[in-house]
Image (cartoon, rainbow, N blue to C red):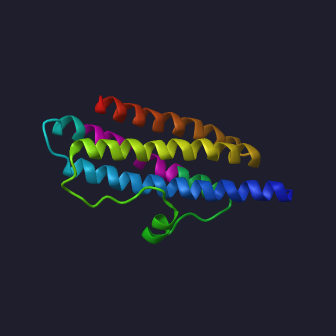
Amino acid sequence: MTTSGNNSKTALIDGLNGLLADHMALFFKTKNFHWHVKGPRFRDLHLLFDEQAIELRDQIDVIGERVRKNGASTLTSIASVASKTQITDQDDTALSAEKMVEELRDDNQKMVDALKALKVHAEEAGDNATDGLIDDWTDMAEERVWFLSSTLG
């Protein structure tokens, strides 16, 4: 593999580990909001947040396995997730339902942007399998953004 190819693969693995961290952090944040949402839209948001958390959870293993299939190591701890994620913690359990939706929308949009950037690295590294999965993950993240945006009105 050329130096350029090595750089592409390194960028891909770093990006996949970042994506893994984002999914893990966003899964936890979404479950947090699922558990703590209050107000007149409680039931709808409680269910929506749970559906989105399950979708994120189900992607975590596939992302980790893509890192391993590329011959690299995955994240190994909460600290490693915290150091790689772009998703900020939210510990305010009294956050309004609207603020929860806004945060999740914005966090999912960050994920869409990261996925689009990662696609370039997958293409440059010649990793067709990851390239195809990124298309699916992007579609799922865009759908989460759409649902959350539509919830805001």
Can residue 129 be seen in the rendering of this structure? yes
Magenta residue check for 131: no
Counting the numbered discs, the total is: 0
Can residue 53 be seen in the rendering of this structure? no
Which quadrant, please, contains the C terminus?
top left
Q: Which residues are magenta?
A: 47-62
Q: Nearer the viewer, residue 152 or 141?
A: 152
Magenta region, mostly helix, strand or loop? helix
Q: Position of residue 57 (x, y in %)?
A: 40, 49
Relative to residue 142, is residue 15 drawn left or right?
right
Q: What residue is at 13 percent from the left and 36 percent from the top? A: 40
Q: Nearer the viewer, residue 122 or 152?
A: 152
Q: Position of residue 150 (x, y in %)?
A: 34, 29
Relative to residue 93, is residue 136 drawn left or right?
right
Which quadrant, please, contains the N terminus?
bottom right
Q: Nearer the viewer, residue 26 or 95?
A: 95
Q: Position of residue 137 (x, y in %)?
A: 52, 40
Identity of the residue furthest to the right in this view: 2
Which of the 4 image quadrants contains residue 82?
bottom left
Magenta residue check for 50: yes
Q: Where 10 falls versus 122 (above or below)?
A: below
Q: What residue is at 20 percent from the left and 51 percent from the top? A: 36
Identity of the residue furthest to the left in this view: 40
Which of the 4 image quadrants contains residue 5?
bottom right
Relative to residue 51, is residue 76 drawn left or right?
right
